[in-house]
Amino acid sequence: MRLNPKTMMDNHLAAEHRGSLTDTRGHPPRTADNGHASLINGLPVELLAEIFWDFVRDTSDTLATTKGLAKPDAHKVPPYRKPYGDPIILGTVCKFWRSVALSISGLWSTIYITTNHPHFPQRLPLYLSRCGPEPLTLSLHISRPPPQYRTNIQERLQCLSRYEDLLGSVLSLVPRCRRLYLDLQWEIQNPKPSFYPAHPLILEEFSANFSGTWDTRKVTKFCALLDASPHLKRLRWQGLRGNANSTATHKLLQSISTPSIRDLELCDFHRFDEMLGFLRKCNDLETFSCYAAKPPQPSMALVLYGTNAPPGPPPFTILGHLHTLSLLSISALDHVFGLLILPSLKKLTIDHCWDMESVESQHSTYADIGWDALKSLLERSQCNLRTLEYRRHGEHEEAPSVNESALVRFVESAGAQWLEDLSISAAVGDETLRALTLRPGKAPVCPTLKKVVLGRCKSTDGAWSDMVLSRSREPTRLKSASVVLKGHSESNFTRDLMLVVPGMIVAAEWRG
């Protein structure tokens, strides 16, 4: 009997998974004979199809809207080294499962290809033959050539040629892609111009990660994928050296279809003032994540702009639908906070990295992210900020502490009074905890606070426990509170607090 070529390919691609189905180390063989598959097969085909969908596309990857409802057609960018469930595996369980899997063309429209696996590139024609005209969710990860190809120049060139052909095959399918995720190492820098589609696309989500020392001019060629994407809603881009060459930032932003964009993540340093014109056109932008580069010094601005330098600060940029903002910076963010009005802001995440050169040159005693400017932003926007996450990165012993006086002014301000979730991973101490402690006869600070997380805290047990106990009664009761304290524990106050305040999750950790 001759096997169908597609069946042979199924068997070949699923060979590594067959062992897991018959593995007897501590478990009975997982086959249809042990009764489990027969019980599942008694379910209606429609319900079995839903189970298959959950296997192929993990429901945990769905995005949540502000109302907590899932967007059925939106998925987070997948981890490139963790592919989705493979429908080929479903077809190896039994004939019934195989027939159901083959009857659902949509199962085969999610395609993951990685050069780290010798058989993954062979999946492309098989999946395309089975998914029919379904829009594609296509993920491509091209890693560096294996070590055995790095010493032999001829073999290395042949390997890179295969990778470029694979990239060309994937890019030729872009007109069919609803979601496209690319993770490309720097060696693959010669995509042919004919790869890029010239007609409008149905692309809604696009993620590009260019690892290593990519040439900026070659990276910007991929912007052609965005030029013809009028329905693009979600974009993640990493590998553009915008801070070194601002023209690259302009090229990328000019390629994005602003009327449709909802979610934008730029994982390279860009000057925020150069993005304002673009952001003003993003009327429906809901989430924005960016690495904010340092603003130019006044003397440098004169060199950059000459006599055309703007006479004063630009007008405020209003982003009416933006509810989630994430910023990473190695400097203060006053220049960012001072440019925006965000009436719908609900969540703010700040990653503040050490800039030791700046600290040493200014002889600063603390590093200030711009708490006063953030206070002004919230008051100006009249928004109800619910979540604030502030993380300081770097373990240098000489790294300065947080400007607690400015932080206290922020938490006591009107703009912070809607906070429900406050997370600060930085060197804060008793001054901050005392400000968060509720006291009789005084107006409550952050009265709606439900969760507090303090990492790398320099406070004492007493200040921490006073704050927690002051928020142990309704309506200002906390749901959870956790802290990382410096030094060694001298009391078991965490256990005592849990006994005093049952129902509240209280956790503490000490680090010397």
Image: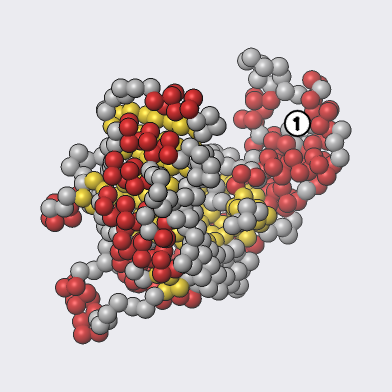
| Foreground residue among 135 and 380 | 380
| Foreground residue among 112 and 425 | 425
Q: Residue 341 is drawn in which quadrant?
A: bottom left
Relative to residue 87, is residue 190 drawn left or right? left
Residue lying furthest top: 26
Image quarter (top left, top right, bottom left or bottom right) of the C terminus: top left
Q: Position of residue 134 (x, y in %)?
A: 72, 58
Judging from the image, what secondary structure is the residue with disc 1 in?
loop
Colour convention: secondary structure
Q: How many marks?
A: 1
Image quarter (top left, top right, bottom left or bottom right) of the N terminus: top right
Relative to residue 421, is residue 375 drawn left or right? left
Relative to residue 91, is residue 346 drawn left or right? left
Q: Residue 394 is drawn in which quadrant?
A: top left
| Res. 190 in view | no
Q: Position of residue 71 (x, y in %)?
A: 65, 56
Question: Considering only vertical position in the picture, is 402 above or below 236?
Answer: above
Q: Which residue position holds label 1?
A: 93
Q: Position of residue 284 (x, y in %)?
A: 55, 70
- At x 32%, y 36%, the residue is 463
- At x 65%, y 50%, the residue is 110
Q: Residue 57 is drawn in which quadrant?
A: top right
> Callout 1, which amino acid?
Val
Question: Considering only vertical position in the picture, is 452 above or below 388?
Answer: above
- At x 34%, y 69%, the residue is 338
Residue lying furthest front: 441
Q: Position of residue 404 (x, y in %)?
A: 27, 49
- At x 46%, y 40%, the residue is 471
